[in-house]
Amino acid sequence: MAKTITITANDVEYTLEFTRKTVSILEKQGFVLSDIAEKPMTTLPELFAGAFLAHHMYVKRDVIDGIYDSMPNKEDLIKRLAEMYNEPIEALIAEPEESEGNVSWETNW
């Protein structure tokens, strides 16, 4: 089950989540999670806004920025968002649970 964060702001409920598709969108836009330490002013708001893409793609950025500005406990929020962001990446590189019926591969060198 995917990790999500539910936010209620101005009587509207938002479900934040990252999927393979939304992580790919962010990467194509130049987002790099490891940039948080060096570029927090751009990276942190982008990470938060990116979490809206899976379920609320058409929410305007100024609304998202306003929600972010109002969020309490941002340090824990960012930690949880980073954990959510990594989940689809971990699923991408995870080994299949069963070997029967899976593709095999080999090299010639």
Image (spheres, rainbow, N blue to C red):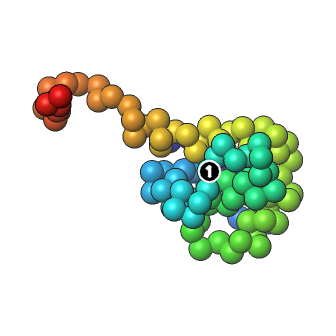
Does residue 13 show up? Answer: no
Where 66 sits versus 34, above or below? below
Work out which quarter of the rendered image holds the C terminus and state it: top left
| Image-based side of 10 in relation to 92, left or right | right
* Residue nearest the observer in this picture, 28 or 100: 28
Q: Mark 1 — residue?
A: 32
| Image-based side of 26 in relation to 64, left or right | left
| Image-based side of 77 in relation to 25, left or right | right
Does residue 43 show up? Answer: yes
Where 17 sits versus 93, above or below? below
Percent x, y of residue 102:
17, 33
Picture residue at 72% right of the left edge, 54% below the top: 43
| Quarter holding residue 55 | bottom right
> Dot 1, crowdedness within 10 Å: few (<14), some or many (≥20)?
some
Picture residue at 64% right of the left edge, 46% below the top: 33
Picture residue at 82% right of the left edge, 45% below the top: 74
Percent x, y of residue 36:
73, 46
